[in-house]
Image (spheres, rainbow, N blue to C red):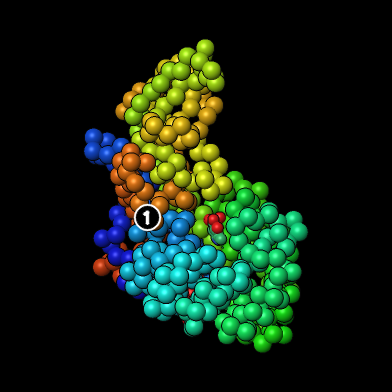
Amino acid sequence: MNGYLNKSNFLMVEEGFTTRDLLENLLEELCQEVRAFFVADLGDIVKKHLCFLKALPRVKPYFPVKCNGSEGVIRLLAELGAGFACANKAEITQVQGIGVPADRIFYSSPCKQVAHIRYAAAHGVRLMAFDNEVELSKVARNHPRARMLLGITADSIPSAHPSMTFGTTLKSCRHLLETAKEQAVEVVGISFHLGSRGLEPQALAQAVATAQLVFDMGMELGHHMHLLDIGGGFPGTEDTRAPLEEIAAGINSALDLYFPEGSGVDIIARPGRYYVTSAFTLAVSITALEEIPVEQPGSDGSLVYHLSDGIYGAFSCLLFDSPCPRPQLHKVRKQPWHSSSLWGPPGHAEDRIADGLELPQLHVGDWLVFGNMGAYTIPTIPTSSLLTGGPQPQVTYAMARGQGWDPVGGAGFSSTWVPSCLWHCPTLLSWTWK
Ligand SMILES: Cc1ncc(COP(=O)(O)O)c(C=O)c1O
């Protein structure tokens, strides 16, 4: 046991008791006091972690905190031995606040404020990323002990989704590696992120091949290159084009070809949505209803329901390439069905959650339930209540007995428990940080 997670952080529920059962109980208890809340199944995250280690045994996961900075998730992943990819000082502070050591933190944002770079330097966080000269000189001046990963863009990689946000082109790599050498900045490897719109195994393999070219370039220039970051984008639900196993098979063979075991190169990844999407279920209530007359310009005659939370809160996942969420009804009534749309709290014309849904007539105070709501739904820095219309939804964490946690004294994950995905691979349970 590492002490990051303890019995007081979650509810231990009986085996067979589902997230939906818990949600129903909470709806009875909380419906008068709150307008929205999450239920999180920590056992689901444990399973995902172990399946990831089985599928990609050479790859160490660094969870991107921006994907879900809720305390239970961060504590659980710290307990399981994952690392953390932090985008700013607030995320570093949060992760170090529960005791995660600096060598398990990757300050992965390619654009960093000088004050945040100094904060990382003062708190021992050395692993960082860059993809341009301005960033490089900020680091050279403010963090002499930084260990940098050079970000390469997906645009360098044929068949990958073009990246607008991260990475330099293959053509610019030599110049940046030379400049780093001149400024005495230590470059230790390469990083890429191919986006989150469905990873293509072929594009990943191509990216690994491109990274190897840049590794050679770096070594030629005298950098000690020994770390490859293959980014995130692994699927969070099962209904995807390429499941984890297929993606992993492509990555593993590319790694064997370009960075074989014994090459001295460690591999990390930043899986976000993979870990948390399916673990979280959101319950939200209807706070207002509008019937927009068909004769009004732009109206399609739909009923418009305003929910207690919107895209500035729990539905911010819509801004991160997540599919449009489909609600389940808490109580199904025999009512006429209508074309309906769901919006956030009134007052923001852009706060549209879902359109064209066929729903029975609903009423103010009714609850809707959304599954697969764990990724990009919980801001690390709370948004203004002026935007969300209220406090952030609280999260109730649960884990079923028998899902690994030793209930006797809460002594951590029991070594005898093996989930079905690991029946052939129990040694992974002893995976530790090194
Ligand atoms: C640079 C970078 N890395 C990793 C991730 C994690 O992606 P995902 O949650 O799809 O795994 C993101 C998500 O936006 C990102 O922008």
Extreme residue in the top direction: 295
Along the viewing direction, whichever of 241 and 353 lies nearer the viewer: 353
Q: Secondary structure at mark 1?
A: loop
Query: Percent x, y for residue 325?
Result: 50, 38
Q: For this view, does 7 lie left or right of residue 189?
A: left
The answer to whether residue 77 is visible is no
Residue 400 occupies quadrant = bottom left
Q: Which residue is mark 1?
A: 381
Q: For this view, does 49 lie left or right of residue 388?
A: right
How many marks overall? 1
Query: Percent x, y for residue 116?
Result: 42, 69
Q: Residue at x 30, y 37 (%)?
A: 35
The answer to whether residue 411 is visible is yes
Q: Is residue 119 above or below residue 63?
A: below
Q: Residue at x 41, y 21 (%)?
A: 290
Along the viewing direction, whichever of 412 and 277 lies nearer the viewer: 277
> Which image quadrant shows ligand 1?
bottom right
